[in-house]
Amino acid sequence: MDVSVSYVLGFVVGLLITMGFFIISSLVRKNKGKPCEYDERQLLARGKAYKAAFFVLIVYLLVEGSFKLVTGVEWADSMTSSFIGICLSVTVFAIICILNDAYLSLKEKPAHCIAVFSLIAFVNLAVVLANYFLKVSFLSEGMLNYHIINFIILIMFAVIMVVFIGKLLHDKKTEKME
């Protein structure tokens, strides 16, 4: 696989910006005296979500590895197939936490979370569209390559956002009925 210097540089810069955003966000939250506090029920639900995400990743890796071993077909390069597994398990974790009201701590606001998810989805959509208009292929030698990673992230955050917003709407509807 031929990885360009510009791609590696873009990946590193994106990673640094993301890390910087989360570090600054954590520092601001810490200075405001709003540490992430979860009650016992939330901690238990998060533990179950971690466990489910871990098992989903294990099953994914076993199925993906067995598929390659049995068929001899390489459907994606190793970085891409690993990243898909990570995104799949993160999505499972987030969905389970959201459905069990354990995604946000007691002091966090849903609007902040939706804004961050929207920003991440928008940035990845922009990269996907740029790749489309630049005619960058998601395939190399008949297998998925690293160019599809932004599309996978876009799908992951879109799914998580839909579940998150759906849960918020469901909770508001339930609250009004009571």
Image (cartoon, rainbow, N blue to C red):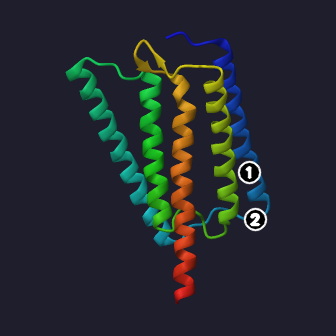
* Image spot of residue 83 (x, y percent): 47, 32
Q: Mark 1 is on which residue type?
A: Ser
* Image spot of residue 158 (x, y percent): 55, 49
58 lies left or right of 47:
left
When asked about the image quadrant of residue 9, the answer is top right
Q: Nearer the viewer, residue 11 or 177?
A: 177
SS at badge 1? helix
Dot 1: within a 10 Å radius of its alpha carbon, few (fewer than 14), some, or many (20 or more) residues?
Answer: few
When asked about the image quadrant of residue 38, the answer is bottom right
Q: Nearer the viewer, residue 89 or 115?
A: 115
- Which residue is denoted by mark 1 in the rendering? 25
* Image spot of residue 61 (x, y percent): 33, 34
Q: Nearer the viewer, mark 1 or mark 2?
A: 1
Picture residue at 44% right of the left edge, 35% below the top: 84
SS at badge 2? loop
Q: Is residue 11 visible?
A: no
Q: Is residue 156 visible?
A: yes
Tag 1 near tag 2, CB within 8 Å = no
Picture residue at 46% right of the left edge, 26% below the top: 80
Q: How much space separates mark 1 and mark 2, taking CA atoms?
A: 12 Å
Picture residue at 71% right of the left edge, 27% below the top: 13
Dot 2: within a 10 Å radius of its alpha carbon, few (fewer than 14), some, or many (20 or more) residues?
Answer: few
Q: Mark 2 is on which residue type?
A: Gly
Count the numbered circles shown. 2
* Image spot of residue 37 (x, y percent): 61, 66
- Which residue is denoted by mark 2 in the rendering? 33
Mark number, residue 119: none
Up the image or down, 141 lies above or below 124; here it is: above
Q: Single out the residue that lies furthest toward the bottom.
A: 178
